Image (tube, rainbow, N blue to C red):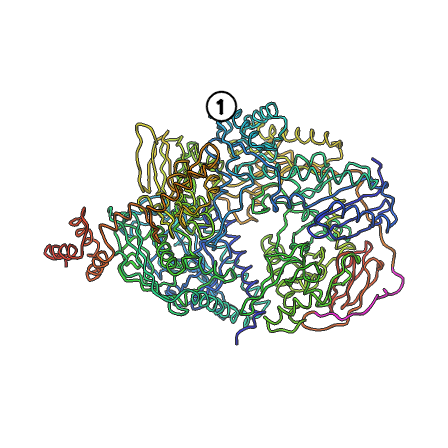
Amino acid sequence: MKDHGCRLGIHIGGTFIDFSMLKEDGELLSLKTPLILSSPIQAVATGLQILTKKKMVDPSAVNYCVYGSAVGVNTLIQRNGAKLCLFITEGFGDILEIQRMRVPVFDLYSRRPVALIPRDRVMEIKERISSDGSILTPLGESSVTKAIEQAIDGGAEGIVICLLNAHMNPEHELKIKKMVLKQASQVFVCCSTEVWPEAKEYERAIATIINAYIQPSLKYYIESMGKMLKEARIDVVPYITKSNGGVTSVRRARTACVKTLCSGPAAGVVGAAYVAKVGGYKNILTLDINSRGTEMALVTEGQLSYTDEAEVGGFPLFIPRVRTSSICIGDSSTVRADASGMLNIGPENAGADPGPACYGLGGTECTVTDALLVCGLLDSNFADGQLGLHPNLAEESIERLGQRLNLHLKEAAWAVIEIALAELYAGLSRLFSREAVRPHNYTLVAFGSAGPLIGCFLAEELKIPRVLVPMVPGTLRALGSIVSEIKENFTKTVMLRLSDVKNDQLNRFSNELKRQALKWLAEEGISVSDSTFRFSVGMRYVGQSFGIEVPLDESWLTHGNLGEISKAFYNVSSQAGASAIAPTEITSIRLVVSTYKGTKPQLKKIPKAVGEPEPMAVKPVYYRRGQYMCKTYRHKALSYGHTLNGPALIMSDGSTLLIAGGFHGNVDYYGNIIVEKE
Amino acid sequence: MPLDKLALRVFQSYIGAAIDEAAYELIHGAYSTSAAEAQDFSIGLATPEGETFVYPGDKGTSWSAAKNIEAALCLIPDYQDGDICMTNDPYSGFLATHTPDIYLWKPIFHQGDLVCFVWSHFHHTDVGGIVLSSISRHSTEIFQEGLRIPAMKLYKAGVLNTDIMDIIKTNVRIPEQSIGDFKAHLVAVNSAERGVHEIIAKLGLYTFKQGMLDLLAYSEELTKAIIAQIPDGEYFFVDFLDNDAASDMPLRIACNMKIQANQMYLDFTGSDPQVPSSLNIPTGGHGNQGLLLVSLMHYFKTANPDLPLNAAISRPIHCILPVGTVMNCVLPAAVGSRSPTCMRVFDVIMGCLSQALPEKIPAAAGANVAVMVMSYTDPKTGKHYATTLEPILGGGGATPFHDGVAANGGFASAFLSRPVESVEAQAPVHVHCFNLVSDSGGPGKYRGGLASLFEFQVVEPGCSVTIRNRDRVKFRPWGIQGGKAGLPSSFILNRGAPNERDLGDADVVFLERGDIASIITPGGGGYGNPLERDAEAVLQDVRCGFVSKLGAEQDYGVIIEGKSINLNETKKLRARIKRQKEAAPFDFGPERKEYDAAWPKAVYNSLTNLLMGLPITERYPAKKEIYKELKGHVVTTEDVKSAWNHLSLKGVE
């Protein structure tokens, strides 16, 4: 790999495809194009052509390419994944029907999501491992042989193996895998312990099933992307974004599909943290509003926060991911009013097809986008003119809403935005109180298609002193993907009371993890010296159901320094509200390995301003129940040191920044606009 | 003046987020697992008059959303800023409905002005009393149900009353756990208070005060609109608990629902006298206390998902709860196991509604909302522990549109099962099986939800399990519109072994090392004629093991040969069965049929009428005597009268 060259990032969302290209000299190019649902890869190819032609880049100069996509999530939601069988311990064959019992509340007709594997394709295997990993019932090989035969007869493409307590001892799972590979070479196999070997059988089974379920479509997609990239003369092994805020080579992604499911929001947070750091801000709140919903995250002292709780398509996902909170209000969320005039946004979403009324694709329901357009906040030549919006259709849909609310057109449009603001305010203030941090120490990084439009209002409500809008707000997820590290998580479940830890037990466990990590690094072709190793443990009081993750110094594990470990636990847990009342236990030891591929990417500074910025036009804009004349600018035409006084609209690829009256924006060295109140 | 709808909607978002956050803090801060896994807590904000105006969207016990706390608020004569009040006594203001539910409430002041109250309960693992967990359905008086804390201030103007904390620590079995949970509970209450102050700072005091009133008015308006859609008329329904826990007499709940325009009247006259067990519901005569209205809340929310659940939904609902019955017990009645009775109340209300709205209401769920708790001694420390094994929930009732949910019905939607791997890592058990039970769902065009089987072996000595709230061991969850009843529940020790024992509805069981316990929950009732069930759906059920081949033939008239349907034979068989059977609106199963034949509705009503004339304490003994005398025959009103006369002769006043 050349040390310098062009980095290309592609994010394929639900409605748009974002491109970000960081040239050798640090120049940042970006593009947003509409997604064509029927031929997404073709849409990427077209976008790539536009990007390279328009910006005059030689595609062969690309020496690092990362992409991320919603293909996994879409496969899951559209239910068109692999035909699978599940092999599970005898006595637990109905696990996918029971689904930990819970069903949505307050609905007489509520049901669980339909299982990804129907019950008649779940086979019980005679075997049992106890909670300490010892074997209670040896593997009944004849039950395995029979199950494999049944699976093949039923035409299964893949077999998922999840056995009780396998995270304590994977022996049986691996044995079955061997038998399957021997007996049925035509199917692929996923073992739960190879996906994420932690306790909770349903969650582990689901993670493994999803991994297998989306595998064929992801594989097909990776192959098509590879072919397309080659045809576009981009001849590198691409990387794919992961939920943990890192990337992995596509070769590995094929077998670790489930780890890519939440990659979109994660890439957004990584991108936001990157531009904020470059701009000199370490404490940020990210506000990523896209067509489907809103993702928010706090980054404190430059550190991202992680979690192993998520829900995708109605299923729990316990694979580590960048912690984001979501609110299902996005640009394409539909808006409705009840008979008494109460307004509600979402959770229904018009998506890409038919999309908001103003797309002119047949949608008639009013969406947030329609409200923004009616207020004059959107350029009807959206996404670089590739998607023409129809203001008349937006007006019609808002008009109908207005009649129910007894409001004039623009008042009704603003009412929609006001409700969205209230929901977002409520969500964000919860985030601050949960993390016990104060908004006035933070900078709001607003991006996505609509984040920059309402950033000012939200910051003002939350008393956040400033809003940072990156140079490429509409394509920040794509930028995030090219500045992400290569990264993998490892875990070892131990279930060990601190008082029971013997001699070098922790050292042995941490060495085991490190060995796995080194093997992984070697396979990825990365040198150990460039990599960072971060250890942590999952800990809780004995008897508690929630554990917390406690970051550790590696030496505490190698030297078995229990004192430091408990101290670290008490420090973290008292913040989380628990109290020192009972013995503690370590549930798992975790290791995260990360490194940059090649040199760390560097953004180029933009030229210094000479004179005042030239507005492109002046247009009427409606917000806060008032009409204002707004100067409009093109973001990329601005220079370092420019000051823009509100009201002003700054257009960039697929996103618009509104600097409301009473605010002003300063352009920094990297093209970020810092918006503050006068 | 009311806020405009836009301002109200903004207020609703803010206040909803504040209360959700408080609930989150409670779940994540709690030491015991009941908050996270059984959602056995509540937190809400109430007006100074006690009407709850906001409650978390999808967290906490469902019945608390509509709670009116006025009676408890009045027990504290003066409120100051910084006070936190507490009670767990069911007879102090009827806030707590059994002793493990410790309630806290805190007045929220803004510049000296009382704005609202935050109130919250947390179900503690134990508050002392006759058994671990403080709840046994066999308690005969409230005095056996642990420590009773009358309404008092835990914090007075911000200062903790450490004496009362010492009393609590001394009286509960697992003080560390209780204290850990108290801390989380207080954090949550204070979080809600902080949230209120933030919203006042943001929207102003006027908007806040008006907003809470308007939110209530809005819910009332929507609720009335829903009731107005129910056909006017009277709908009567009766259902029974298997027994009253003090004898083998079934416990009767009766309700007459009257719909008049947009008002609903629920008259529980005809329900049995209070019992010397803990199945009594302490309502204090208040229908607006929330506990009774769960099934209605579900219906309302199904009819209009935008309806904000708060106390105002009970404004158009009027309850008659006769004093001294299980629906409104008086001291010293024990109340610990009021849950199974409440479940039956929900069934009864659904039974009434189903007559009014046959195309909308599901069949009965296998309404067990039981949690199996194991207590054991840690061999390493010698300390006692109690840990949840699993919730024991029945299958859901089939709806007019689809099959019932497996292993969760009866308004227990929020319950989360524990991972078996977590259970085994904690408790000295090996779980053999946690699966569904074939043929347990009531047959119907839409099949009732399947029951679950939880089977485990004990691997240490000295263990016991408590399974509160089980019922439907005898009387089955009913099917409707031609649908059949689901299978009843069972609890067997050492199934198939020489020392096999049927434990019936036992709620506390001591287990030896090596014992294997198997608990089967009830299955949900079916909806619609099973002969109308799509034969392909029956075939798929057979493939999945949800229905046996025999069941397919006998219940659905579908003949399955090998892996496919014999269409010809199926057609013939279905036609034959159709001729034989006529469809009834309700199918209660054979046990109930037999009981109804012995005690026809009118005869039972005459008995209840007579009993209600006696002083409260004498009703149950009288009922027991009359029962004894009439046991074994088909009873008539004359029989009841003559037994009554014998009773008087025996000197019962």
Q: Is residue A68 left or right of residue B261?
A: right
Residue situated in front as seen by the camera: B19 or B261: B261
Q: Which residue is mark 1?
A: A138
Q: Label 1 marks which chain's residue?
A: A
Bounds of the magenta segment:
A609-622
Where residue A217 sits, quadrant-wise, is top right
Quadrant occupied by the C terminus of chain A: bottom right
Residue B493 inside the magenta-drawn segment: no
Residue situated in front as seen by the camera: B351 or A132: B351
Observer able to see residue B147: no
Residue A621 inside the magenta-drawn segment: yes
Q: Is residue B158 left or right of residue A427?
A: left
Residue situated in front as seen by the camera: A11 or B446: B446
Observer able to see residue A643: yes
Q: Residue at 84% x, 65% y: name it.
A: A616
Q: Residue furthest left?
A: B649
Q: Position of residue A368 (x, y in %)?
A: 66, 62
- Circle 1: element type: loop
Quadrant occupied by the N terminus of chain A: top right
Where residue A160 sits, quadrant-wise, is top right
Where residue B457 sits, quadrant-wise, is top left
